[in-house]
Structure formats: structure tokens, C-alpha cells
Image (tube, grey):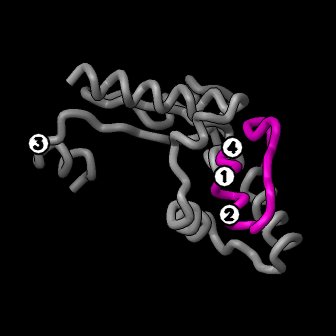
Amino acid sequence: MERRSVLEKAGTNAIFVLTDLDQNISIEDTRLRIGEYKNQHIVVAVRQAEAWFLADSATLSRLLDSHFHVEYPEQETKPFEKIRDLFLQRTGRGVGTKPILARRMLKYGFTIENAAKHPNCPSAQYFLTKLQTLASAN
């Protein structure tokens, strides 16, 4: 059974799809790739969602055990590779796969609020505002 059907049968009022552009040219192309459905909200993060990890300077500083800041996290063309290289340079260890990195970031305090505080991370700010707006409407 499709995940959407399972969620709807469970009484879900809204489905949020958080995605990134990946190889799509535009946000519209990404929306077309996903498809439009009733009670669905699509938020396209950036080319790669790992840019939000780069925007959370506090969490990365804890993980790297030294001050860390990227001025324009969303301009990084390959944020996962940037993070992987940083870990190798500063700690001598890798970060594993993207899911492993995500779990580690969450364990050490990553939040969308932290990423949204970065002055040059508008997609995180947009996502947080979208969630807050939808929550207050319900």
C-alpha cells in the first residue's frame, strides 16, 4: 500500500514533503517530480538539504570541537562533501553516509531553528515559517 494511503487511513490531516532540488533545474520541476495531492505541502529546501547542517554553526562547532561558520551555506554546491572533508581535516574521521550524518547532527543538537537563525539560509527560514503558519492555522 502506498505510504500516502497509509497516512490518510490513519487520519493524517496534512502531509509535508521536505525535499531538495537534487538534479532538477527548478522548484517547479521538483514539484512535478513529486506530484500534487490533496492536503500535501511541498517544501523544496535547496539544491541539497545538507546545506542546513552547514548553517547550524553551533552543532557543527560541537562536533568538530572548534569554532565553525560558513558564510553562505546554500551556495555550497556539494554540502555533504564539504562536511565530509571538514570532518576528515579536523578530526581525522569521516562522517559515513548521509543518514548517519543526519542522525549524528540530531544527536548533537541540530534543529531547523538553529539553521533558520543563520542570516544566509533563507530556505531553512522559509521552511520554519511555513510550519509555524500551518500549525497556527490548525
Instruction: Report, in whole angstroms, how far the alpha carbon at label 2 lies from the one at label 1.
Output: 6 Å
Circle on res. 62: 2
- Helix, strand or loop status at disc 2: helix
Q: Tell me the quarter of the image containing the N terminus.
A: bottom left
Residue drawn where x is 59% and y is 41% of the image: 20
- CB atoms of marks 2 and 1 within 8 Å: yes
Looking at the image, is 32 positioned above or below residue 102? above
- Position of 134 compared to 72: left or right? left
**Which residue type carries mark 3?**
Gly
In primary-sequence order, the first of circles 1 and 3 is 3
Circle on res. 11: 3
Q: Which residues are magenta?
A: 55-78
In primary-sequence order, the first of circles 2 and 3 is 3
- Position of 73 compared to 117: left or right? right
Near mark 1 (Cα within 10 A), the count class, few <14, some 14-19 or many ≥20, is many
Question: Of the residues tagged 4 and 1, which is closer to the observer?
Answer: 1
Which residue is the site of mark 1?
A: 58
In primary-sequence order, the first of circles 4 and 2 is 4
Residue drawn where x is 12% and y is 48% of the image: 10
Question: Of the residues tagged 2 and 3, which is closer to the observer?
Answer: 2
Instruction: Report, in whole angstroms, how far the alpha carbon at label 4 lies from the one at label 1.
Output: 9 Å
Instruction: Report, in whole angstroms, how far the alpha carbon at label 2 lies from the one at label 3.
Output: 39 Å
